[in-house]
Image (spheres, rainbow, N blue to C red):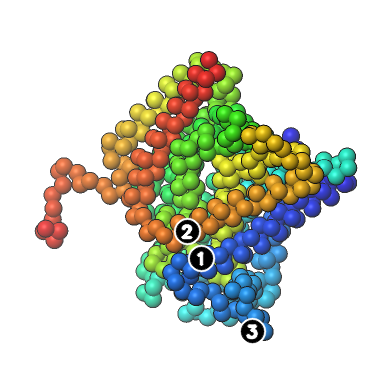
Amino acid sequence: MNFAPVLLFFAAAFALVLISLILNRLLAPRNPYPLKLTTYECGEEPVGSPWIRFNARFYVIALIFVVFDVEVLFLFPWAVNLKTLGMFAWIEMAVFILILSVGLAYVWAKGDLEWIKPKPDNYLPTQESK
Amino acid sequence: MLETAIILAKIWGVLLTLVTLAAIMTWVERKQSAVMQDRLGANRADVFGLRIIGLFQPMADGIKMFFKEDFVPPKGDKFLHTLAPIVAFFPAVVIFAVVPFGDVLRIGTLEIPLQVARLNIGYLFILAFGGLTIYGTVLAGWSSNNKYSLLGGLRAAAQMISYEVCVGLSLVGLIMVFGTLQLDLMVKQQGELIFGFLPAWGIFYQPLGFLLFFPAVIAETKRVPFDLPEGESEIIGYYTEYSGLRFGLFYFAEFIEIIVMSALFSTLFFGGYQVPYLYADGFVFPWGGSWNLPHLVVVLLQLGSFFIKIAFFCWLQVLIRWTLPRFRYDQLMRLCWTGILPLAVLNILITGGILLLIKG
């Protein structure tokens, strides 16, 4: 397997980006002043650090992603060789997919795939939200 | 020595073609929207009063990008802020290294495969580098020192990793049919015929696979109707704090992605460079009769067919862009995890079963 052309292609693509960035640096004016450099938040003064905590749902999605990406990883070599491996390999993989599907069904039933979470059963509406 | 020169020439040609096509795509996007909305559209840029339907616009845009001030938010992470557009741009270009744009060109005894690199891991290479673009968006959001950018970057990341699973799974069926990951071998197999008359294109083996792959790829490239991370007019996205050429790289990467993905659609599902009934020495029609052609004409016809297919899918993507409204974020996630994903898994099992039954 000859990876040399790929490496050359990488170098060429990288050079393309680098040259254009350097050209921009040489050609563009530079005139920063405090007002220009403030964070753009639609004209509001930014409050607090921008590196805030974010919604945990992103984390759940990332976890499900890892599981299914590993599944994809297992599926590719199996898919390439399926015709030579035969029925036994198909059944094996069907079992594997079934186990993962149970996981997906669990996450689905738990409501983690719904972006707008259903309210918990013991949810008490406060005075304002009524 | 000669070999290196040929490889360099191919790399140069591919990069030049990609950048030129991407520049033209920026014009196509605007002009097509203008035509669809009954406007005049991009027609302001002129050279000595000459306008040629606005084709100078991409040139003017490119030159403008180079002369724009490029600032880094002072509290942001300067290194990552510079790295992000590079990481977004680089993989989009690199993917094209494994896409075959023609068969073998013979000059005398010299055989030149019209593909930058013949890798046997072809499609895995594409998945790997396609996955890298996510880092570009996340780093851009994180390093900008802006809450909106951070949230935009995170939403983009959640969308892209979700659809990456779908992109991977929806193609497993096709790989089972072809039994290889190498793109030029896939295209070679698509030059054959099913039932003696139908070209053996991937779409005829895997219609469901294509229907799942197409929206997943559009979501992966963050185009309408999946453009929540960067909806131009309404949403503040991950590149709010970018200007000058660093913004230009993000912008350009999107158009290069459109072209590369169009190339992928045609390579995987529509026969790549293959013309129906065209073989190495000319046309052989299934209803009898043949038409011999010289080698060079065959190669040029194949190159032409590849470019026409790319142009068609570019047109289709822009058409979708200006036709459909945007999804809501929860609809987007639901479509991926509860729509495309289960169907893709089902497609894999059914395709495998049928393949084994046919084989006996």
Circles 2, 3 touching at the beta carbon (< 8 Å): no
What is the three-letter code of the residue carrying label 1? Gln
Dot 2 or dot 1, earlier in sequence: 1
Rendered view: B49 above or below B176:
below
Question: Gap between marks 2 and 3, in whole Å?
Answer: 30 Å
Question: Mark 1 — on which chain does it sit?
Answer: B
Front-lying residue, B266 or B99? B266
Question: Mark 3 — on which chain does it sit?
Answer: B
Q: Are marks 2 and 3 on the same chain?
A: yes
Question: Gap between marks 2 and 1, in whole Å?
Answer: 8 Å
Q: Secondary structure at mark 2?
A: helix
Circles 2, 1 touching at the beta carbon (< 8 Å): yes
Q: Report which quarter residue B247 is drawn in.
A: bottom right
Front-lying residue, A59 or B157? B157
Judge left or right: residue B77 versus residue A45.
right
Whether residue B111 is visible here, answered yes or no, is yes
Q: Badge 1 is on which residue? A: B32
Residue B70 placed where, x, y %?
Answer: 58, 72
Tell me the number on the disc at residue B286: none
Q: Are marks 1 and 3 on the same chain?
A: yes
Question: For the residue carrying disc 1, how many other residues have a C-alpha within 10 Å: few (<14), some (14-19), or many (20+)?
Answer: some
Q: Report which quarter residue B15 is drawn in.
A: bottom right
Whether residue B150 is visible here, answered yes or no, is no
Q: Secondary structure at mark 3?
A: loop
Question: For the residue carrying disc 2, how many other residues have a C-alpha within 10 Å: few (<14), some (14-19), or many (20+)?
Answer: some
Residue at 46 percent across and 50 percent down: it is: B219
Residue at 74 percent across and 52 percent down: it is: B11
Q: Badge 2 is on which residue? A: B319
